Image (tube, rainbow, N blue to C red):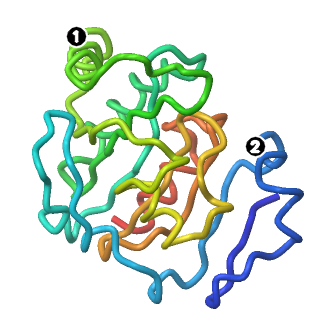
Amino acid sequence: AAILLNSNGRQHMASLLQFGKSLFSARQTNINDPTNRPSFYDRQFTDIQGQPVDMNQLRGKVALLVNTASECGYTPQLYTLQELHDKYKDKGFTVLGVPCNNFGKQEPGDEPQVCSLYASKFKTTFPLTTKQDKDKPSEVFQWIIDAGGKDVLPQWNFHKYLIDRQGHLVAAWNSRVKPLDEEITKAIESIL
């Protein structure tokens, strides 16, 4: 059971009993006709080192935006996110990690600690933003709300958002869907 948004952004299936309940029933959120929604690449974000990043430099690439945490049961997905990044990076794809401490306080470190841990323990090379808070207006989560509405905000760590080459949100998957699942790889390949 997927959550589908029509071109007007209205949600079908009566919000699937408040998206939080759908965490365990809906694996994927499909976003139909995203072209009238804001482009991810028109935004400016701050990287894990505190430097501004003009996302326009990623325009023309496909991105998988993932809210991450280093002390979560899903944390081993960092390894497979890196595999996914490596598999498609030469075809115009990147993973973008978004450390977040909202769910179970499972990303307690500050930015330097997070950056060091991800690089040393998980061998990540994909870019990371500063830590974000989904409950406060922030660079990343405000874009998700603007692009898909509050119902597509993550309900736990390792929620995944697929962004096309124009910077539009086209699909989202909950934490249980692993980065190398066929659902995700086929969706990526279809827009590369």
**Tag 2 secondary structure:** helix
Task: Report which residue position mark 2 lands on.
Answer: 23
Task: Residue 73 in the image: state x and y as whole percent.
Answer: 60, 16
The residue to which callout 1 is attached is 120
- Decide which of tag 1 and tag 2 comes sooner along the chain: 2
Taking the spot 20% from the left edge, 69% from the top edge, the residue there is 59
Q: Using residue 30 as the reference point, say whether residue 132 is left or right of it.
A: left
Quadrant including the N terminus: bottom right
Tag of residue 41 = none
Say which element carries label 1: helix
Q: Which residue is depicted at the point 37% across and 69% down?
A: 164
- Image coordinates of residue 5 in percent, x first then y, are 68, 77
Neighbours of disc 2 within 10 Å: few (<14), some (14-19), many (20+): some
Residue at 30% of width from left, 9% of height from top? Answer: 121
Q: Position of residue 184 (x, y in %)?
A: 53, 50
Name the image quarter holding the C terminus: bottom left
Circle 1: residue type: Ser
- The answer to whether marks 1 and 2 mark residues whose Cβ atoms lie closer than 8 Å is no
Q: Amino acid at mark 2?
A: Leu
Q: CA distance from mark 1 to mark 2?
A: 31 Å
Where is residue 43 drawn, in percent x and y? Answer: 26, 68
